Each structure stands twice: as C-alpha cells, then as structure tokens.
C-alpha cells in the first residue's frame, strides 16, 4: 500500500481569522483553532491547510505578506503556532500553510528598501522597468479591481511589476538571492513542523518577467530546485500547488519532460472543478467523463487535489462560452453573484438551493473521484454566503458553531468583526450551526463524518486508478470505478432528478458479494451485479472487491 500520506488525506482548508476566536477580540486566532481540533478530528480530516498566517496589512486576506518568518499577531505568536502543530499532530492531523512567494506586500521592508534606493540590497528582489511597459494593461488577474500589471512608483521613479493587485509587487525569481530566501522560508516552517505548503500562484512565481513581453519564459527548473530542497529538509513534506494553467502545461508542474515527478506533488484540479460544476448545472455527467478521459498520466507520486469550493470565486474561464453561460444561468444568474466575468462568488449550499439531496450527491461525487479531496470550512454544515460583502468576502464569513451570539465564533461586540456572521434566514447561524447538526444523526455534518469514514476504508480512491464505466444508464447517471491492488470500488451517481436503472450486469464476474457502503438511502443490496436502481440525485458506493 502506498505510504504517501497525501494520497490518503482529506484536507480541510480554513482561514484562522474566520474560524474560532479564543480571546474575544473579534478575530479568530490560533488558540481558538486549537480548541476546535477535536471537532476536526471527529469529522475525520487529517490535513489542515491554513490560509496565510503571516503578518499582513490584510488588503488581500493575508495574501500580501510583510514578514514570512512570523505569524500575524492577531492570530497569536510562534509559540501558539508550535502548540497548534503539536496538538494537531496528537490527533493525527498534519498542517500545511500557504506559501505566498510570488509577491510580497508593498509594505514589506524588502520592497520599502528596494523602492528607496538603487543601492538597496533588495532593489533587484523585485521586477522594474525604466519606461512604461507596452503590455502594462495585459494579464490582470483581477480585471475590474486591478487596472494594470505595471505601476509607476514615484519613490523609485521606476515601474514595478505586479501580476495581482498593485500592493503586491512580484518578487524577481531570476535573482538567486530571492530563490535562496524562498528556500529559507520553507526550511523555517518545516523546522517548526509543518507538513508542507500550499503554494500560491505557482505559474507566476516562475515567470521570468520582462517589460513588454507578455509571454515571459517560465523557469520550471526552480520547482525542481525547491522540491529537492524541501524533500531534503523533510522527506515526507508535500507541495500542493495552485497552477491554473492550460491542461497541456499541467504535467510539467509535476515533473520534467521525462515524467519523473520531481517537482510539485499535488496540483489543484481546476479543470475538474469547472467541469464538476458544469455537470451539476446541466445534470449531465458528460463533462466529468471528458475530464476523466482527458486527465494526463501523472508521474509517480503525482496527485490531484479535488475541490468544489475554495476561498476564491469558482473559476469558469476554461469552459467554453456556452458552458459558462449554462453555469451562470443555473448557479449565478444575478450579476452580484458573478466576479471578474469568469466566476461565481457563492458557496455551494446556496448554489444548490440548499437541497440536501443535491448537496450529498455533489460531495459524494467529489470525494469519489481520483485524487485527494479538499474541503473548505463550513461546507460540512452547508454554510451560506453574504452577497452584501465585497468580492470574495461573500464566502469568507465566520464559522457558525452554535446558536450563541455571533454563532459562537466570538464573544466580541459584533461591530468588532472583520466580516459579520451570517444572521437570520435559511443560512443564518441560528439555523445552520455545528452544535445543532452534531446532535442530529441525520444532519449534513453527521453525513460528512460517515462519508469521510467510508472513504478511509477505500484507499483505492486516493491511490488507485479512476475510470468511467460505460454501461447502460440514464442520461444523468455517472458510473465510475477506482482500482488498485487493495481492491475495487464502483460508484453510481445520478446528477439528474429522475430515478433510473443502471445495468451493471457486464461487471457481474467482478464481485462475489457486492455491497453498498454508502448510499443516499437504503436500497435492496445489489447481491449480484445486475440492474440496480438509483433515485434522482441518488448515489451508491459499491464495494466490489477487497484484498486482504
Ligand atoms: C491566489 C489566491 O488563492 C488568492 O486568494 C489571492 O488573492 C491570489 N493568489 C494572490 O495571492
């Protein structure tokens, strides 16, 4: 059996400031998170991904760092962080942190020094141009919120490059000192005990930017260099990258052209994410079947990270215009639900009309597809969004723990909160909260606990192959299977609302005692593989084979 822990992990992503506040100042903190580790252990997750933890002016929710060697004082101190690692470790939970090294905050002492003098040792840590680059109005990641990618700095009397907001100047990866610093940052946190990094904006980190060249070369070799360094410092450390690039480019991020898996271990599967959402919108598994078919072969040790929602908008930019139109029509019909013309700034529960059957179907499907599932805080209780907040803040409201004021997130005066707790209505904390769902064995939270436990008994999902099974089935039904030397699981998911019958008789020889290990309701046991029924939005996880 594979002993690569990340292939069998269930990752839970959270932002410390929105999770749990122990000191009552209105901002979540590390001690608050430590107090909730038992909750996370019971849920069954075994890897935490923390959104940026470093000191930051907070202009991009922490993705604008001013000190890579510390934790944001609002969250606690390094002692608290070491305590968190220890307590999480006691519960079998590994911790990975966001590594945001494409850029710094413009308030970072490096940039402040760099802009002030041509003699600053940090001047060449950033990317400058003496003249206005012709391509300065191209390549914005946040169109509408970001006017350009080069901004004139009056102090330096030069233009500086920023792939993201103008307060996020890009670091210059061509500079060996920058490369060494990034490695030193990794070493520091590995030494403290993190299990790896979620690397932000990887295609941009390796961009060898030149003014006027909007198609700058990419230094993929830096990823090899970084992987070697990280692996040497901590053998089982993992790099999980955000690299939302063209599908034919993806494999290079895993390893060099020989396919040797010597770069990033795990990549978020953005393509699958968009196609999952399209499949749900159209009630049609075809886009998912396409995604499984088009998945490039990964090098040894390469792994996908699957997700339905993350802390950003759902990015639909890699869908065709027609596909995008269908997703917007179904899940983001109001302009206020859309972002940057390419995405949806909603949580999944409101997108799916808070329909419990539909939600189960969606998550059962995500967790059954190849790769390591990533869940974002609040998804397990079906939290909603707050579209009155700006941009991506709509989906970053505090965790809803109980019916206590502020949903039990904090005892502070609500006026002190950075983002308000969702209050009242279908998704308010009075209705949607952990405590209520914990007492209810039929709740979504209880279902997630069961589902994750079941997944734990099916290592072939994370470690094995995943393929579409072409059998007679109604239009909305996806049948797929996961195989490895430990066994085989068969999955039937009905994306449509009509019940139907799936003919599994061609697989009859494969299982002596097939049985449902997870399903939307009690079905007559398959007993043998034959015609089986699946309800609208129903699903059946069937174990076919298990080797001792
Ligand atoms: C990607 C992150 O997911 C996003 O939240 C952030 O704004 C940008 N990178 C810039 O760091």
Image (cartoon, grey):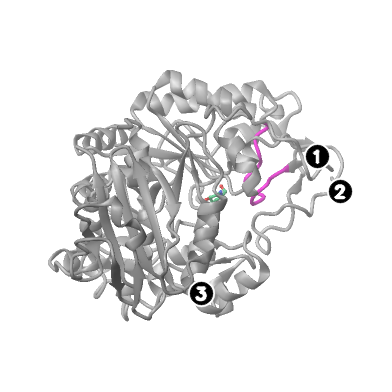
Respond yes or no on whether mark 3 lies under 8 Å from ligand 1: no
Q: Is residue 170 magenta?
A: yes
- In the displayed structure, would residue 400 be above or below residue 476? above
Select label 3 or label 1 by which is in front: 3
Which quadrant holds residue 133?
top right
Region rendered in magenta = 161-172
Task: Give the Cα distance between marks 2 and 3.
Answer: 42 Å
Q: Which residue is mark 3?
A: 282
Task: Give the Cα distance between marks 2 and 1.
Answer: 17 Å
Nearer-N-terminus badge (3/1): 1
Q: Nearer the viewer, residue 31 or 469?
A: 469
The answer to whether residue 422 is visible is no
- Rendering coords of residue 167 (x, y %): 63, 48
Residue shown at 54%/65% (left/top)? 391
Report helix, strand or loop for mark 3.
Answer: helix
- Left or right of 228 on screen, residue 436: left
Q: Residues within 10 Å of mark 3 (few under 14, many from 20)?
A: some
Report helix, strand or loop for mark 1.
Answer: loop
Residue shown at 53%/75% (left/top)? 332
Q: Which residue is mark 1?
A: 157
Residue shown at 38%/38% (left/top)? 96
Q: Which residue is mark 2?
A: 134
Q: Nearer the viewer, residue 128 or 289?
A: 289
Q: Residue lying furthest top in this view?
A: 232
Quarter holding the C terminus?
top left
């Amino acid at each position: 059996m594979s002993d690569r822990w990340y292939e069998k992990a269930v990752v839970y992503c959270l932002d410390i400031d929105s999770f749990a506040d122990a000191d009552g100042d209105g901002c979540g903190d590390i001690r608050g998170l430590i107090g909730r580790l038992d909750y996370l252990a019971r849920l069954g997750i075994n890897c935490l991904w923390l959104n940026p933890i470093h000191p930051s002016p907070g202009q991009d929710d922490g993705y604008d760092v001013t000190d890579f060697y510390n934790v944001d004082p609002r969250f606690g101190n390094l002692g608290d962080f070491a305590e968190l690692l220890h307590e999480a470790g006691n519960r079998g939970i590994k911790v990975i942190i966001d590594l945001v090294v494409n850029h710094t905050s413009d308030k970072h002492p490096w940039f402040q020094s760099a802009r002030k003098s041509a003699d600053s040792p940090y001047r060449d840590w950033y990317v400058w141009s003496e003249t206005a680059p012709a391509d300065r109005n191209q390549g914005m990641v946040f169109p509408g919120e970001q006017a350009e990618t080069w901004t004139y700095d009056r102090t330096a009397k030069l233009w500086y490059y920023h792939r993201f907001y103008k307060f996020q100047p890009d670091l210059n990866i061509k500079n060996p000192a920058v490369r060494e610093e990034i490695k030193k940052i990794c070493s520091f946190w590995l030494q403290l005990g993190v299990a790896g990094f979620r690397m932000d904006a990887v295609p941009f980190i390796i961009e060898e930017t030149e003014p006027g060249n909007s198609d700058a070369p990419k230094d993929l070799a830096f990823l090899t260099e970084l992987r070697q360094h990280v692996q040497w410092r901590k053998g089982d450390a993992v790099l999980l990258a955000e690299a939302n690039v063209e599908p034919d480019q993806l494999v290079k991020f895993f390893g060099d052209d020989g396919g040797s898996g010597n770069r990033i271990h795990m990549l978020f599967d953005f393509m699958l994410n968009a196609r999952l959402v399209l499949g749900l919108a159209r009630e049609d598994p075809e886009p998912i079947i396409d995604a499984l078919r088009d998945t490039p072969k990964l090098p040894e040790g390469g792994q996908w990270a699957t997700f339905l929602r993350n802390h950003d908008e759902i990015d639909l930019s890699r869908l065709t215009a027609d596909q995008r139109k269908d997703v917007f029509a179904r899940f983001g019909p109001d302009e206020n639900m859309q972002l940057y013309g390419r995405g949806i700034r909603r949580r999944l529960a409101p997108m799916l009309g808070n329909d419990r059957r539909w939600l189960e179907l969606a998550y059962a499907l995500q967790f059954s597809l190849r790769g390591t599932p990533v869940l974002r805080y609040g998804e397990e209780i079906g939290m909603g969004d707050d579209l009155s907040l700006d941009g991506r803040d709509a989906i970053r409201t505090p965790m809803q723990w109980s019916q206590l004021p502020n949903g039990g997130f904090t005892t502070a005066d609500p006026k002190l909160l950075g983002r308000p707790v969702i209050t009242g209505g279908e998704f308010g904390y009075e209705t949607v909260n952990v405590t209520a769902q914990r007492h209810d064995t039929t709740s979504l939270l209880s279902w997630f606990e069961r589902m994750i436990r079941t997944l734990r008994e099916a290592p072939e999902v994370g470690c094995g192959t995943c393929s579409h099974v072409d059998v007679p089935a109604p239009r909305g039904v996806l049948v797929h299977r996961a195989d490895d030397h430990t066994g085989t699981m068969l999955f039937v998911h009905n994306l449509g609302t009509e019940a139907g019958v799936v003919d599994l008789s061609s697989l009859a020889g494969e299982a002596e005692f097939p049985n449902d290990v997870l399903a939307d309701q009690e079905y007559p046991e398959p007993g043998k593989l034959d015609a089986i029924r699946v309800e609208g939005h129903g699903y059946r996880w069937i174990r076919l084979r298990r080797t001792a």
